[in-house]
Image (cartoon, helix red, strand yellow):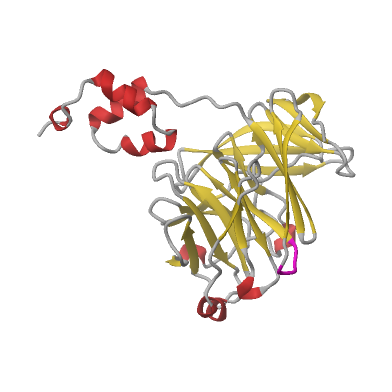
Amino acid sequence: MADDEVFNLPTDALVEILLRLPTSARRRFRLVCKLWRNVIDERTPERQVRTKILTFISHGRSSRATVYDDKDGHRRHEWTYNWSTYGGAVHMVGTCNGLICLHNAGEGVRSPIRVANPVTGEAVALPPLSATIWNSFGHLEVYGFGYHPVTGQYKVVRVPSRLARRRDVGHVLTLGESASWREVVSPAMADGYNPFCGIVGVDGSVCWFTSRADRVVALDLGDEQVTSFMGPPGVQLVLTTGEASWKVTNVHARLGVVVPHYEATAMKVEVWVLNGGGRDPPRWSRWYCLCGSRIILTPNLTHGEYVVSRSWDWDRLYRCKVDGDGFPGLSSLHC
């Protein structure tokens, strides 16, 4: 049966229905048939939402997230969460679509992970790793948080360390659908991760550098397949994790890698962006060459037209409008 015979519905009526759905739902409905895909692409453009800047600062057992308006730089919302039960530092796993994922490290199998909305102050605790997983794989891991635009699912990913007993086994938890962590087994994870290079959820995947910092590993949040590919020019094999200074980040919803170059009087940062998804060999393009050592690089380098930077004492934050040559001017955020 032809695609246009499956749904006997006038196109204008279909458009009115689709326009009332969230953008994420429309992306999923593109897979129904060719007719729906064409109607969604041609008649229901992506909603243009003004960018908000989210900052996160951790102080011991508490953390503070602040939302700034990208138009005037004024603070709109501030959210503080104090961990009441467990010790250890509070780390931001990641942030996407206005949600922030936090991890209270240092408490073994009890280490809690929460996903929160900084605007409403609501927070949901995720199921902890089971004692069986903890005893089998140890506590040497890093977590990532991401969103898949087609499935509409948010997932938290646990990446094992190169020193873990099972280096090729990671774990994934889907928010709202699963009560436990699922195993993901792949040889691509066997090289562990480099903690100096960060981890980021971007373009439907969670990405990190191997412990040797020369290859990027990507776990697709749709089919949960794991691939790896070479990093951009400027990264190389390292002997110890501390030798790596490049980081993965989000550059306008694409996977980016920032590569700093230290000079006598300043630091320059090359920003490379992956084109066409993960393949080997990958296609990297250099988008920016930025100046200044106070740039906040992860997990999001860009916020609309801006990059956020900070003062040395963290008392001031600045948004910087970027072009190919760096920063033509700074404007202060109202901290």
Percent coordinates x, y for residue 34 in the rendering? 24, 31
Say if residue 182 shows up in the picture.
yes
Percent coordinates x, y for residue 335 in the rendering? 82, 36
Percent coordinates x, y for residue 251 in the rendering? 60, 36
Q: Between 156 and 263, which is closer to the camera in this rendering?
A: 156
Percent coordinates x, y for residue 53 in the rendering? 68, 35
Is 33 above or below relative to 102? above
Q: Residue furthest left?
A: 1
Q: Residue, x 77% and y 61% (percent of image)? A: 61
Q: Residue, x 65% and y 47% (percent of image)? A: 121
**Is 13 positioned to the left or the right of 245 in the image?**
left
**Is 173 positioned to the left or the right of 309 in the image?**
left
Is 148 above or below relative to 316? below
The boundaries of the magenta stretch are: 85-89
Is 71 above or below relative to 302? above
Is 8 above or below relative to 169? above
Q: How many marks?
A: 0
Q: Is residue 307 magenta?
A: no
Q: Residue, x 61% and y 61% (percent of image)? A: 113
Could you tell me which quadrant the N terminus lies in? top left
Say if residue 210 shows up in the picture.
no
**Is 281 positioned to the left or the right of 258 in the image?**
left
Q: Between 268 and 205, which is closer to the camera in this rendering?
A: 205
Q: Quadrant of residue 20 in the image?
A: top left
Q: Between 272 and 59, which is closer to the camera in this rendering?
A: 59
**Is 30 positioned to the left or the right of 297 in the image?**
left
Q: Residue furthest top?
A: 12
Q: Main secondary structure of the magenta part?
A: loop
